[in-house]
Amino acid sequence: MGIKIIGVGKSLPERIVTNDELSQYIDTNNEWIMERTGIAQRHVATTESSLDMAAAAAEEALQGVDKESVGLVIVATITPDHVTPAMAAEVKMAVGLPNAVAFDINAACSGFIYGLWLAESLMKTSTGAGSGEHGMKRALIIGSERLTRVTNWVDRGTCILFGDGAGAAVLENDPNERGILSTYIQNYDDVHDVIHCKANYINPPFWEDDLTPIPLYLRGREVFKFAVNSINEVTTGALVKVGLTLDDVDWFVPHQANGRIISAAAKKLGQPLEKFQISIDKSGNVSSATVPMALYDLKQTGKLKKGDIIAAMGFGGGLCAAGAVIEW
């Protein structure tokens, strides 16, 4: 029994902010940003909500799919439009998925792969739309973020990194396919508080808490080390579970956090950079959305063939990391 990916989608805001434009607001320049991150531009949502982007990516991924057969919607996000309702519930309604169970998850930049992990398990064991003897028929997994609304736009060390967007994948339960071969999920205690973003609450008269808003921040060197090591752990861990090696992988689809991280991870894994899908130059770090967006980009190149082995990996706040091995 296999849970395979049958459709992918991507949505980006219309507004593009280049490095040169960013240098009009903070002390930086294109060369400095490119050298440290590999990012040339990012998309910034000015009128688009997280829901708008999530729904658009979902609609593209769902092309040709019977929407009544979708039994599950999972949205991974750290920047939902509302505390409640869940974004997944809003996507279910906006896209028209009458039979789906819907909920959100927050696993930062690993969120999409956490979603794959959850969906695979639920689809094999739960009833839902179109369920049969093998479980739930189809599921929709989305990563959607508006990171630019929690970014510190006067901190040049972080604001250069982030962008907005959404990516989506439709999964199908097919006993004749292999699909998701394995997942490997890991959490680590963030004892040094290297990635953090404080919630912004309305101040009631009874609280004594300090409710000063604190935007998204990270400690670059610590994050770099964690990222490279965790990519190695979750990728090799997922491969070992199915008896594969790094050389068996046709394509690596990593979280697009920083071009330097991807290059360092490729070196640590002993794999050519040409096997890594790199999309960060055009969209920056979009947290939970980067893996499905990069998978979409890889498919659009025309290089991805049926039967290819893909290793996807995410890492981020929590600290958390996740890897998945997928047969296309």
Image: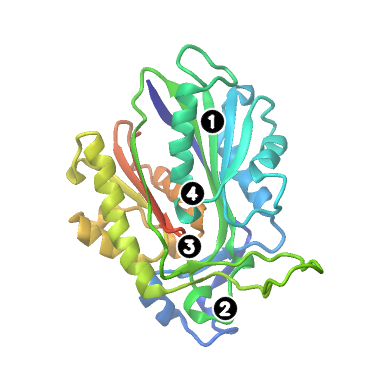
Query: Looking at the image, which residue is at 26% across and 54% down?
Result: 232
User: Which of the numbered marks, if any, corresponds to residue 285?
Assistant: 3
Which residue is farthest top?
Answer: 133
> Do the residues under discs 3 and 1 have CB atoms within 8 angstroms?
no
Amino acid type of disc 2?
Glu
Spatial CA span between label 3 and label 2: 18 Å
> In the rendered image, is residue 255 in sight?
no
- Are there few (<14), some (14-19), or many (20+) residues within 10 Å of tag 4? many
> In the rendered image, is residue 245 in sight?
yes
Q: How is the image coloured?
A: rainbow
Query: Looking at the image, which residue is at 71% across and 72% down?
Result: 208
In the rendered image, residue 277, in percent from the top left (x then y), is placed at 35, 53
- Are there few (<14), some (14-19), or many (20+) residues within 10 Å of tag 3? many
Q: Quick check: 37 left or right of 283?
A: left
Q: Considering only vertical position in the picture, is 118 above or below 40?
A: above
Q: Nearer the viewer, mark 3 or mark 2?
A: 3
In the rendered image, residue 102, in percent from the top left (x then y), is placed at 63, 35
In the rendered image, residue 322, in percent from the top left (x then y), is placed at 38, 48
Spatial CA span between label 1 and label 4: 16 Å
Spatial CA span between label 4 and label 3: 13 Å
Mark 4 or mark 2: whose residue is earlier in sequence:
2
Q: Nearer the viewer, mark 4 or mark 2?
A: 4
The residue pinned by badge 1 equals: 139
Mark 3 or mark 1: whose residue is earlier in sequence:
1
Amino acid type of disc 4?
Gly
The residue pinned by badge 2 equals: 21
Q: Considering only vertical position in the picture, is 211 above or below 156?
A: above
Q: Considering only vertical position in the picture, is 227 above or below 137?
A: below
Classify mark 2: helix, strand or loop: helix
